[in-house]
Amino acid sequence: MSVPDSSAGHAPAGGPVLPTNRLSHRLDGAILWIGQAVSWLWLATLAVVLANVVNRFILGRGSIAVEELAWHLFGATMILTLAYAVVSDDHVRVDVLREKFSPRAQAWIELLGIVLLALPILTLMLDALYAYGYRAFERGEHSQAPSGLPYRFIIKTLIPIGLTLVAIALASRALRCATLLFGFPRRLEGDGSPPTR
């Protein structure tokens, strides 16, 4: 699996090529590494789903624990790879007007959206979600099904961890927008993006 080079100004068709600065380069590199490592969990998820299908429909013996494990692996992999989609800019964009704007206008919209909407909302969510995971740990939560999985706090704690990675990825993206718009932080030499005008 190849990792998009965030320092090369990777951008989708129609999107601005954002210059990279030293801090965003390091943050993006860490997020891309984590995303690539976690993406291997998709194979484990697939294996557990297939085992569940074979057990239930071919061998006639379903397992609640295996079914829950499939859902937990799916959820963990999804939440832990969201930040990868932000950094590589492979997430879904709904804004049809955005493509009609200049790269600078797109960067302004993105910067304001991140700073005024996304990061404040994520901060509020993270405050509640870390407490949510910790409460599950304190109570020793487990599945309500008799043969279900124990240690429910693991999956509940992965939710805020994944969203923390998303917040880091968005902060890095905001820094890249600032580099394009204001020239600060200073662009990394040889990042491959066109000069800031």
Image (spheres, grey):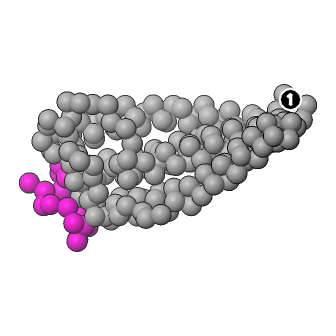
| Residue 78 image offset from top left, x and y in percent | 56, 43
Residue at the (75%, 34%) spot, across then down: 135
Q: Find out whether residue 9 is within the magenta segment.
A: no
- Per the image, the residue denoted by label 1 is 145
| Residue 151 image offset from top left, x and y in percent | 80, 42
Depicted 74 relative to depicted 32: above or below: above
Numbered disc 1: secondary structure: loop
| Residue 156 image offset from top left, x and y in percent | 68, 38
Pick the quarter of the image with the C terminus.
bottom left
Asked if residue 102 lies left or right of residue 41, the reply is left
Depicted 21 relative to depicted 85: above or below: below
Asked if residue 170 lies left or right of residue 81, the reply is left
Q: Amino acid at mark 1?
A: Ala
The magenta region covers 178-197
Q: Find out whether residue 191 is within the magenta segment.
A: yes
Crowding near pointer 1: few (<14 within 10 Å), some, many (20+)?
few
Asked if residue 103 lies left or right of residue 134, the reply is left
Q: Main secondary structure of the magenta part?
A: loop
**The furthest residue to the right:** 146
Residue at the (39%, 42%) spot, across then down: 91
Asked if residue 53 lies left or right of residue 164, the reply is right
**Does the image show residue 133?**
yes
